[in-house]
Image: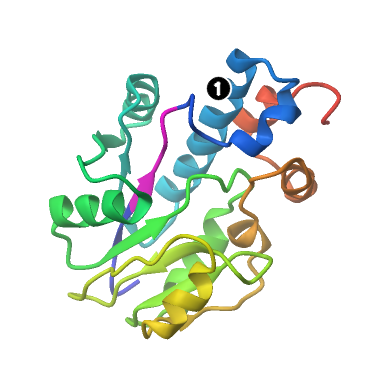
Amino acid sequence: MRDEVDLVVPVKTLDRAKTRLTSATGGDPVSHAALALALALDTVSAAVATPGVRRVVTITSDPAVAAEMAALGVESLPEPPQPGLNQALLHGARTLRSSRIGALQADLPALRPDELQAALEASTGRRAFVPDRQGTGTTLLLAAPGGELDPRFGVGSAGLHRLSGAVALIGAWPSLRCDVDTEEDLRLALALGLGTRTANALPARTT
């Protein structure tokens, strides 16, 4: 691939992550933290294994997350003083100073490296994004080579990224578009094929 990408993956502290998935683990905070961590680890592992991805860095202030990422050989940067996902991504982009930067959501436990690679290649050097399966959110945002990331994550981020000039990438990439916020999302990701860590973190009733 001509333009390798450095990916920034934001990961909340485990006590704040994936609150809508609490019911999936029966309300047990330890099991919930383990599931939230597994989602991020499977996502990052797939990204690291993707041709065309040069480097993956997580943005997190959770020592447990940073330690697990370090075991994967992935560097973690602390969250900036300014709150919010977009500020965390801008912090990561400024720190990396890469020729090409991207932002990947941390809740893609079924992610396949070949699908992520296909999306990177489809961007053909443009600022681009991949919408989630509902078409309203964003799972991947790519800056143009040498360009700004300009993240607009939040409610309706797909529309906001489109309005900001990013090109929507639509392909047969179900694992890249299946972010997990709810139990329904988790069941859909399960059908696609979960990463090992997430599969092992699920309670028996979910599987």
Give 193 or 168, whichever is nearer the viewer: 168
Give residue 102's position: percent from left, percent from top.
34, 62
Amino acid residing under circle 1:
Ala
Give residue 76's position: percent from left, percent from top.
27, 35
Display coloring: rainbow
Q: Is residue 137 left or right of residue 84?
A: right
Say if 102 sits above or below 196 in the image. below
Say if 17 sits above or below 109 in the image. above
Residue occupied by mark 1: 33
Q: Is residue 55 visible?
A: no
| Residue 14 is a magenta residue | no
The residue shown at (22%, 72%) is 148
Say if 39 sits above or below 88 in the image. above
Give residue 57's position: percent from left, percent from top.
29, 44
Q: Is residue 196 visible?
A: yes
The residue shown at (24%, 67%) is 100
* Outermost residue to the right: 205
Residue 193 sits in quarter: top right
Give 159 or 126, whichever is nearer the viewer: 159
Other residues around mark 1 within 10 Å, as few (<14) / some (14–19) / many (≥20): many
Quadrant of the snapshot with the C terminus = top right
The residue shown at (74%, 29%) is 23
The residue shown at (72%, 23%) is 25
Magenta residues, start to end? 8-13
Say if 69 sits above or below 30 in the image. below
Give 195 or 134, whichever is nearer the viewer: 134
Quadrant of the snapshot with the N terminus = bottom left
| Residue 10 is a magenta residue | yes
Give residue 28's position: percent from left, percent from top.
67, 15
**Number of marks in the rendered image:** 1
- Provide the secondary structure element on which disc 1 rests: helix
Q: Is residue 186 left or right of residue 181?
A: right
